[in-house]
C-alpha cells in the first residue's frame, strides 16, 4: 500500500497537472467542437505536443485514481465502519485506471505517424472515436467512486465530514445527471457540477491528507 504522503501528492498534484495538459491540448486544436477527423489532423500536425499531452494526461489520470484507490484501501478493515463502501470505491478507481490505459493505447495507435497499424488497413478515425467513447464511459464508474468514497468518509469520520459530504453530493450529481440528461436540461447542468467538482475535491483531499501526515510526523 502507498504511504499517506504519496497518496496525498498523487491526489493533490494529479488534477492540477491534468488541467495543464488540457490547456496544452487546446493550443493545437484538439477538443472543443472539432470533429474526430479535424482533431486527428491537428494532432498529426503537432505530433510531439499531442503525444506529450496524451501521455501526460494519462499519467495524471493514473496518479488521481491510484491515489484514490490507495486512500480507499487504507480505510478498509474488519473493524472499520464503512469498510465495504471504501472497498467498492477502491475497486472502481483501479478499474478506471486500467480502462483509461486501454483508451490511451488505441488513441496512440490512431495518431501515430507512419503507423504500421494504419498501413495495414486500420481506420484512424474509427479508432480515435472508439478511444473517446471508452474515455467517456469512465464517468459512470467515477460517479460511483465519489459516491462510495464520500459515504465511507461520512461513516468512518476519518477526515472532514465536509469532504465526505461533497464527494457524496458530486458523485450523485454525475450519476443522476448522466442518467437523466437529455442535452441542455437541468440534469446536464447537474452532471457538469459533478464533473467540475471532482478534480477540485480530489486536489483538496490530497492537500488535507498531506496536512494530516505533517501533523502526525
Image (spheres, grey):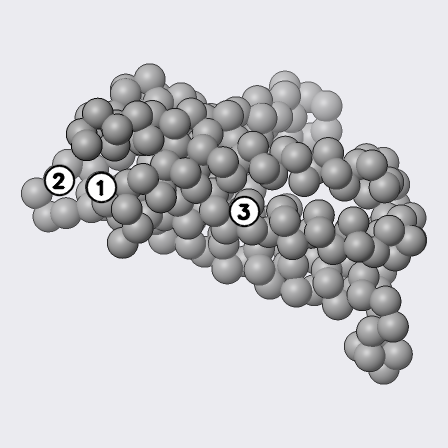
Quadrant of res 18: top right
- The residue that label 1 is drawn on is 75
The disc at residue 80 is 2
Quadrant of res 68: top left
Precedes in sequence: disc 1 or disc 3: 3
Precedes in sequence: disc 3 or disc 2: 3
Q: Nearer the viewer, residue 115 or 122?
A: 115
Query: Residue reaching furthest bottom?
Result: 120
Q: In front of the other: label 1 or label 3?
A: 3
Quadrant of res 74: top left
Q: Position of residue 84 (x, y in %)?
A: 23, 45
Precedes in sequence: disc 1 or disc 2: 1
Image height of 47 relative to 161, above or below = below
Q: Residue at x 71, y 51 (%)?
A: 52
Q: Secondary structure at mark 3?
A: helix
Q: Secondary structure at mark 2?
A: loop
Q: Residues within 10 Å of mark 1 (few under 14, many from 20)?
A: many
Q: Left or right of 189: which side holds 13?
A: left
Q: Left or right of 7: which side holds 117?
A: right
Q: Residue at x 76, y 41 (%)?
A: 25
Query: Residue reaching furthest front?
Result: 217
Q: In front of the other: label 3 or label 2?
A: 3
Query: Mark 1–mark 2 contact, CB under 8 Å?
Result: yes
Gap between marks 1 and 2, in whole Å?
7 Å
Looking at the rendered image, the quarter that the C terminus falls into is top left
Image height of 194 relative to 50, above or below = above
Q: Residue at x 33, y 31 (%)?
A: 210
- The residue that label 3 is drawn on is 61
Amino acid at each position: 500500500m502507498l504511504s499517506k504522503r504519496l497518496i496525498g501528492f498523487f491526489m493533490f498534484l494529479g488534477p492540477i497537472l491534468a488541467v495543464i495538459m488540457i490547456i496544452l491540448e487546446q493550443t493545437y486544436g484538439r477538443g472543443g467542437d472539432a470533429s474526430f477527423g479535424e482533431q486527428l489532423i491537428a494532432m498529426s500536425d503537432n505530433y510531439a505536443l499531442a503525444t506529450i499531452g496524451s501521455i501526460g494526461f494519462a499519467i495524471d489520470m493514473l496518479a488521481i485514481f491510484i491515489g484514490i484507490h490507495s486512500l480507499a484501501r487504507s480505510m478498509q478493515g474488519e473493524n472499520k465502519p464503512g469498510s465495504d463502501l471504501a472497498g467498492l470505491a477502491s475497486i472502481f478507481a483501479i478499474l478506471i485506471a486500467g480502462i483509461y490505459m486501454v483508451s490511451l493505447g488505441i488513441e496512440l495507435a490512431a495518431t501515430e505517424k507512419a503507423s504500421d497499424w494504419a498501413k495495414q488497413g486500420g481506420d484512424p478515425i474509427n479508432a480515435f472515436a472508439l478511444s473517446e467513447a471508452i474515455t467517456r464511459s469512465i464517468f459512470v464508474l467515477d460517479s460511483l467512486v465519489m459516491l462510495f468514497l464520500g459515504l465511507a468518509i461520512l461513516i468512518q469520520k476519518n477526515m472532514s465530514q465536509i469532504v465526505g459530504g461533497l464527494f457524496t453530493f458530486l458523485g450523485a450529481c454525475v450519476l443522476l445527471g448522466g442518467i437523466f440528461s437529455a442535452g441542455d436540461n437541468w440534469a446536464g447542468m447537474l452532471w457538469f457540477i459533478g464533473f467540475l467538482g471532482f478534480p477540485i475535491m480530489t486536489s483538496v483531499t490530497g492537500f488535507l491528507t498531506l496536512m494530516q501526515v505533517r501533523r502526525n510526523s
